[in-house]
Amino acid sequence: MPVLALIVIGAAAGFLATRLMRIEADIPTTLLIGIAGAVVGGLIMRALLTVMGWMPGFVGAVLGALLLIWLWKTYFRR
């Protein structure tokens, strides 16, 4: 996935994931969560699916961001 597409999809996924998990995060944190989630989710989706296109990548990015938020809330935020 090109870097620009990763940033755009990651930003959208981070925004959606922070709203679904009901956390308040600043813009850089939201972008970082989304981009990291896009990387994690993209790797998971590539391993599990052979479907090509942007929609599975976006779903994977949101799922990856949700996973990272859950891990952050569970283990790192006190």
Image (cartoon, rainbow, N blue to C red):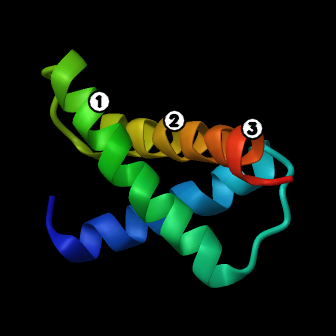
The tag on residue 44 is 1
Number of the front mark, 2 or 3: 3
Q: How far apart are the two marked residues, 2 and 1, measured between alpha carbons?
A: 9 Å
User: Does residue 66 appear left or right of residue 77 in this picture?
Assistant: left
The numbered mark, 2 or 1, whose residue comes first in the sequence reads 1
Q: Residues within 10 Å of mark 3 (few under 14, many from 20)?
A: few
For image coordinates 47% across by 40% down, the residue present is: 64
Image position, residue 66 (x, y; %): 61, 40
For image coordinates 86% across by 49% down, the residue present is: 22
Instruction: Give amino acid for label 2.
Output: Leu
Q: How far apart are the two marked residues, 2 and 3, measured between alpha carbons?
A: 16 Å
Instruction: Give amino acid for label 3.
Output: Thr
The tag on residue 74 is 3
User: Does residue 27 appear left or right of residue 32 in this picture?
Assistant: right
Please state which of residues 18 and 77 is positioned toward the viewer in this rendering.
77
For image coordinates 36% across by 72% down, the residue present is: 7
User: Quick check: marks 2 and 3 in contact, CB under 8 Å?
Assistant: no
User: Does residue 13 appear left or right of residue 45 in this picture?
Assistant: right
Image position, residue 38 (x, y; %): 38, 52
The numbered mark, 2 or 3, whose residue comes first in the sequence reads 2
Q: How far apart are the two marked residues, 1 and 3, measured between alpha carbons?
A: 21 Å
Label 2, secondary structure: give it. helix
Image position, residue 49 (x, y; %): 21, 19
The tag on residue 16 is none
The numbered mark, 1 or 3, whose residue comes first in the sequence reads 1
Q: Is residue 43 above or below residue 76?
A: above
Q: Residues within 10 Å of mark 2 (few under 14, many from 20)?
A: many
Instruction: Give amino acid for label 1.
Output: Ile
Image position, residue 4 (x, y; %): 25, 77
